[in-house]
Amino acid sequence: MKAYKDKNIRDEKPYKYRPVLFFALAYLFTWIFWIPAIFVHENIGAVLMFIGLLAPAVVSTVFVLTSKSTLLKKDLKVKLIGLYKVKWVNVLLAILQFGGIVVASILLSLLFGQSLDQFSFTKDFNFTGVGIAGAFASITLASIIEEVGWKGYCEDSIGAYMNWFWESMLFGAIWSLWHFPLIFIKGTYQATLMVNPLFVINFFVSAIPMGFIITWVYLASDRSILACMIYHLVINFLQEKIAMTPETKCVETLVVTAVAAIIVITNREMFFSKKHVGRLLETRYGAENISGNMKALASE
């Protein structure tokens, strides 16, 4: 067996992920800012929402930096800045795929009385109070910050204990519920859905099949956070700027579910393999699997 050049990696004990504690703290430090935002002026609420948005990324980074695991720290570094890990063709295909989801959803919505006018851009974003430039900056920052938290530690912390199919299911549900206070905060996209309970339910349900697609983007680019940031940004932009009605977004959830099912079926080894369970980092960077980029990581 080949030895690591980095003695700290070679000799340290396997890292044990702590998903329950992570989610407890991520929820706590998000909601202690988001819940007060319900009751204050919209401008102050925007500041509180931004601080709460930072929570998963901050908790994730703290978990990694205080872990005493050299391998976990190196793993985060590579996932954040390892441009060579991004499979750009896969990312482009994923973006085109989501564009196809939007087109299919609008076309199917015609069967339910919706209009072709949905094939256009909205003048404004769905949330208010920050202007167009501020809104675009907000969805960009949200895409970056969320993925640092969710992919920096969260998804791996679940995936270390189960296959990626069940990880995607569990993460999608937890990620969905994390947004819950936003439906009560004036000016948010989620608050605009309160006109119909079906729209609210659809928002939370839609995150579960989307979790499978984002996990696929993550794994297909060798667990690259950058790939997920780009994909998340495109999704946020299209969901905000394409003039789909709330009714069409309910149809979209069905289309996303169908696409997620196809992805799982065509990537069964990726989603159902248990080789990584209990030894996620060791499987990725273990001596028996070191090659190419992994050798570079171990020799840093």
Image (tube, helix red, strand yellow):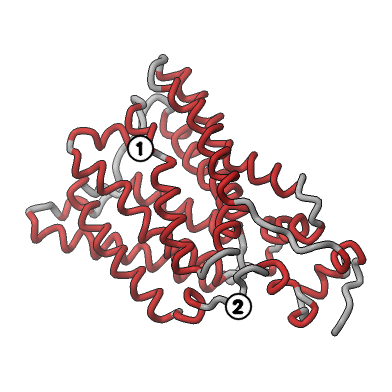
Q: Tag 1's secondary structure? A: loop
Q: Earlier in the sequence, mark 1 or mark 2?
A: 1
- Residue 115 position within the rendered picture, expressed as x and y whole percent measured from the top left: 13, 52
Q: Is residue 51 above or below residue 160?
A: above
- Residue 255 position within the rendered picture, expressed as x and y whole percent measured from the top left: 26, 64
Q: Nearer the viewer, mark 1 or mark 2?
A: 2
Q: Residue at x 71, y 63 (%)?
A: 82
Q: Residue at x 57, y 61 (%)?
A: 227
- Residue 279 position within the rendered picture, expressed as x and y whole percent measured from the top left: 67, 69
- Residue 106 position within the rendered picture, expressed as x and y whole percent measured from the top left: 21, 58
Q: Tag 2's secondary structure? A: loop
Among the 4 quarters of the image, the one containing residue 130:
top left
Closest to the observer, 166 or 53: 166
Q: Quadrant of the C terminus?
A: bottom right
Q: For the residue marked with disc 2, what is the amino acid? A: Lys
**Residue that label 1 marks:** 125
In the shown orientation, is residue 200 left or right of residue 89?
left
Q: Quadrant of the N terminus?
A: bottom right
Closest to the observer, 126 or 68: 68
Q: For the residue marked with disc 1, what is the amino acid? A: Phe
**Residue that label 2 marks:** 275
- Disc 1 to disc 2, C-alpha distance: 43 Å
Among the 4 quarters of the image, the one containing residue 222:
bottom right
In the shown orientation, is residue 146 left or right of residue 170?
right
Name the mark on residue 69. none
Q: Residue at x 39, y 59 (%)?
A: 210
